[in-house]
Amino acid sequence: MSTLAPPSAWGLRTRPWGLAPAAHRELLRALRFDYHKWDTFSAGGFTILPESMVVPESLHHRVVTAVEALSAGLSRFEARVRHEPEALERLGIPKALHPLIAAEPERPHQCARYDLFPCDDGRLMVSEFNEDVPGGFNETEGLPALLGDPGPGCRWEAGLRQHFVRAFEEADGVGLLYATAFSEDLQHMLILEAWLQAAGHPTVRGSPAHLRRRWLGAGKARVLGTPVDAVFRFYPGEWMPRLPNFAIWQRVGPDLPMMNPLRHLVRQSKKMFDLWWEDSAGDAETRALLEAHAPRTHPFRPDQVDRLRAERSEWVLKRAFGRMGDAVVMGTLVTAAEWDAALAEAARDPASWCVQACFRVLPLEFEAGPLYPTLGAFVVNGRFAGYYSRAAARPFLTHEALHVATVVQLS
């Protein structure tokens, strides 16, 4: 277990909001009703820490440089492999999606979030890339507006709204497509809908199952009967082949401007680090980028179970696709029996799993005690677009992680 990071390690610190109880309650009420953040209280506790994480400007520049370089590198990697069925299969992407991914034209539409962990070896590490259904829009927009002045010598980096709306500037009607069974997904759609409508874009909310085209091969795509020029997809890409209208997606999908396109499953797969490392042979710049930010990742192999059992503390077991920590098992955080059970499950379907070298995140002192932070950075069309940071009691982010407002300390 790492000790607490001294101030000289990263320069990160925390600062309480300093709100009176009544003001704190009012802020949470406004966040729920004005910014659609309904789950400010969940599982017996508040999901938002009443303090801010203060990031020195030098570290902020490192974050921006890292996420924009990673996004550009991922775009180059994706462009090379998305036409290769063998590569897509290695990444665990359903075969039914391969023709769609290959047929999608090159468009810039992207809304991603990269979670960077400050580690004990001085690296900012990324365990995966959330290029499919990145959340956190509500808090990222709401807290800077509700908290106001970020404090002496500090500024908010809250440009997500402007970047997002600008990405749809050429579209008239925009469809917001999400997994309609999940209320937490609806709250994200409501805030995006408010942004788009305020900028003059008509919107329609629905499931990807609601996509239609009135005339085969002609006319605009429609969602619940409403014509759309572009869509925002907040629906896991690997679920798409299960849709009752998947045949319509096969015909209409490649022609429909979509954020995020299905080809971004190349980036979303947790198995992609292995293929990216292999693909970067002879590319010193990409190798340096991966060395600086990406843990070594390998395909799961049943013949290595004995080694993985013996080296439990050094590995993380991951399914290629999942949400909010689902199907991710950290050897350091489970018992030997639990690790054995996870290895046995992976051995039944080895092509769907990978193993990733464990990195050690430095904890940071909060009012509640030491927590493990991550600097969550939004990336829209390749550019940094604001923070959505979190902290957790363990060095493992799941749906239980707590949101922490993030400000940048001016030099």
Image (cartoon, rainbow, N blue to C red):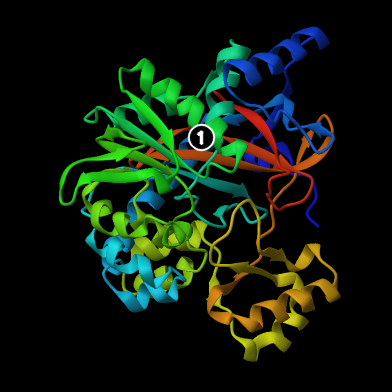
Q: Report x, y in % for residue 28.
A: 70, 18
- In the rendered structure, the answer to whether residue 260 lies left or right of residue 25 reads left
Instruction: Tell me what residue is drawn at x 71 percent, y 49 percent.
Output: 362
Q: Report x, y in % for residue 32.
A: 65, 21
Residue 302: image quadrant is bottom right
| Residue 299 can be seen, yes or no | yes
- In the rendered structure, the answer to whether residue 205 lies left or right of residue 315 reads left
Residue 263: image quadrant is bottom left
- Of residues 352 and 8, the one nearer the viewer is 352
With respect to residue 300, does 37 lie above or below?
above
With respect to residue 220, does 265 lie above or below?
below
Q: Report x, y in % for residue 236.
A: 49, 53
Residue 369: image quadrant is top right
Element under disc 1: helix
Instruction: Tell me what residue is drawn at x 69 percent, y 31 percent.
Output: 39
Instruction: Tell me what residue is drawn at x 52 percent, y 45 percent.
Output: 179
- In the rendered structure, the answer to whether residue 96 lies left or right of residue 320 reads left
Q: Report x, y in % for residue 248.
A: 30, 55
- Of residues 49 and 122, the one nearer the viewer is 49
Tell me the residue that label 1 is attached to: 60
**Label tally:** 1
| Residue 268 can be seen, yes or no | no
Instruction: Tell me what residue is drawn at x 72 percent, y 81 percent.
Output: 344
Amino acid bearing label 1 = His
- Of residues 169 and 120, the one nearer the viewer is 169
